Image (tube, rainbow, N blue to C red):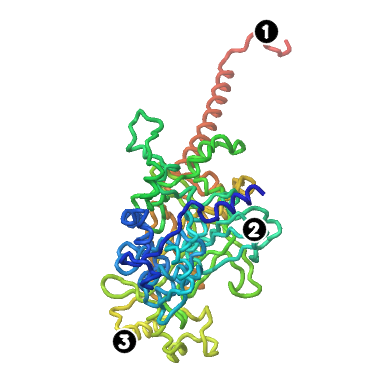
Amino acid sequence: MILALLGAALAAPSPMHPAVPLLDLDGHPVAVTLAPVSTLQTCGACHDTDYIASHGYHSEAGLDDCLFERLRRVGGTRHVGGGPLADTVELDCFLCHLRDADVEARRRTLAAGQPAWAATATLAQTGLVEPAADGAWAWRAETLADTAAAGVEQLPIQAPATEACGACHGTIWTSDEPLQLDLEAPCSTSTGQVFSGQRLSDSALPLADKEALSRPWDVHAEHLLGCVACHPSPNNPAFFHEPQARRPGHLRFDGRRLDLGEYLERPSHDFAKGRSLQYTVAEDLDGSMRRCEDCHDASQAHAWLPRRGAHLRALACEACHVPMVYAPARESLDWTLPAPDGRPHQRWRGIDGDPEGPDTLFTGYQPLLLVRQDPDGTRLFPTNLTTTFFWVQGDDDAQVDPLLVAAAAAPGGTWAPALLALLDQDGDGDLAQDEAVLGTDAAVQWLADRLVEAGVPAPRIQGELRVFGLHHGVAEGEWATRACSTCHTAVESQVGRNVELARHVPAGASLSLARAGAVELPGRIERSADGALFYLSSSRVPGLYLPGDGASRWVDLLGVLALLGTVLGVGVHGGLRILSRRRRSPHPKCDRREP
């Protein structure tokens, strides 16, 4: 009951925040001008929005090299505004600070080419606005009249809620209703991670052995920790921790920090972050977030673990505490022949059956443990490997818009007859998932010619292998890995096992490793007899030796030398004793022969 009340209090709007007059870009009340709302003007009356806009790397989010979220429209789908697009898409404070912010309405507005109305669309659930023609929005005069009488608009402003992060970062579930999964959520589908305190057995998902899964999706969410517990604002007085490099050596604690009022005026939005394996945004903040060891003292637990110190130095906490991912994760993504509606063909890890079928079963998957070189040591981390295939053009390898590829392959929304003749193996006039692959040189050349006709210079197919680290979905001790065979075996080890990367590969596609941080990929990539692509892992990494998994030449040599030395020592010692006894003359009293 206490936890439920605390959770409700954390989710409620702030009772201390005053009513906010909504202003347009010129600083005039929208109740008078009926122009799009400006968050920088509206929030700037109390907060230094220029400072916030320049100290928030989310203004760059969606604009980096992440292929899954590559911009196809002004502003994209996960860009919060500001940054390089500040002149067209203003930083949208409502996305995180407004309860029930309408993220989907904002995305539709951006897709319709109305960036000026993007922040206004976020207010769709407040009753203040309604859709207008051409993707724009109109203020509801009767609602504005009621609030304008006092000169303010009552908005449920709040501190950033965990759910607000989930709108862009993946599946975060805080409702009492059974958890449901959105397979279109970008970050969750890349790893299968779910952040929720609900128990797996209470979810609405078709999980294998569901009745026995009494653990929560994430133990931190179960104890009501939110995203800001580990990813706070760096100048928040409650979380401020001066980096050791800037702190005088004689100080163990520095009490100097911002006053709360100063922080509220100029809160930094450069949130603390980890060392990402796949994204390049705000790399100067890598490692600034709180890690497991900042809250937990591992040396006071794990008494059952042999050679505890060696294991804690070689393993990240997630290696054992994220032992299994129960939601499906993306295995491969193929943009080379998208569906007529522009969607890529996907293959999932941890799903038995059609993802959208009635008999689907979520079997989950075990992460692959890879070595990562961090400043404080070399450790094994759990990861998911995904492959992406796509068309590029020109000398700069710019990605071709998937909608353009879909239009070339399926003009008018139906597959071109010439393409069907090349790929339709069962002759039913459509392309099933296994058929919708450019598996032959003829099919690749046909579509390349169509792209050239559409104005694409020098189109060609490329592939990327991406490594995604797993840091959520944390299990408590009872569910964490305890079996030595998880790593110390040559069969089905989480370190040295083989991982399927793609069931089908476009003809002629080259595969390169995308940015992977400091992760080590000691294995090799090979094609199987049926054309599938596999990563053949290996645990033979410099600085890491796992007894029982593979062999070490030096260890084997030392073992052989030790064995030979022991045999040789015993043999020499025994031989010398025999020779010594034979050479000694017998003592008269020891002569037992009869006279």
Q: Which mark is residue 553?
A: none
Residue under the point 40% across and 70% down = 31
Looking at this view, name the residue that lies furthest to the right.
Answer: 594
Residue under the point 48% across and 62% down = 154
Q: Which of disc 2 and disc 1 is earlier in sequence?
A: 2
**Residue 495 visible to an observer of this rendering:** no
Residue toward you, 71 or 432:
71
Foreground: disc 1 or disc 2: 2
Amino acid type assigned to the residue bearing label 3 in the image: Glu
Q: Which mark is residue 200?
A: 2
Label 3 to label 2: alpha-carbon separation:
51 Å
Q: Which mark is residue 453?
A: 3
Q: Which of disc 1 and disc 3 is earlier in sequence?
A: 3
Label 1 to label 2: alpha-carbon separation:
86 Å
**Residue 78 visible to an observer of this rendering:** yes
Helix, strand or loop for disc 2: helix
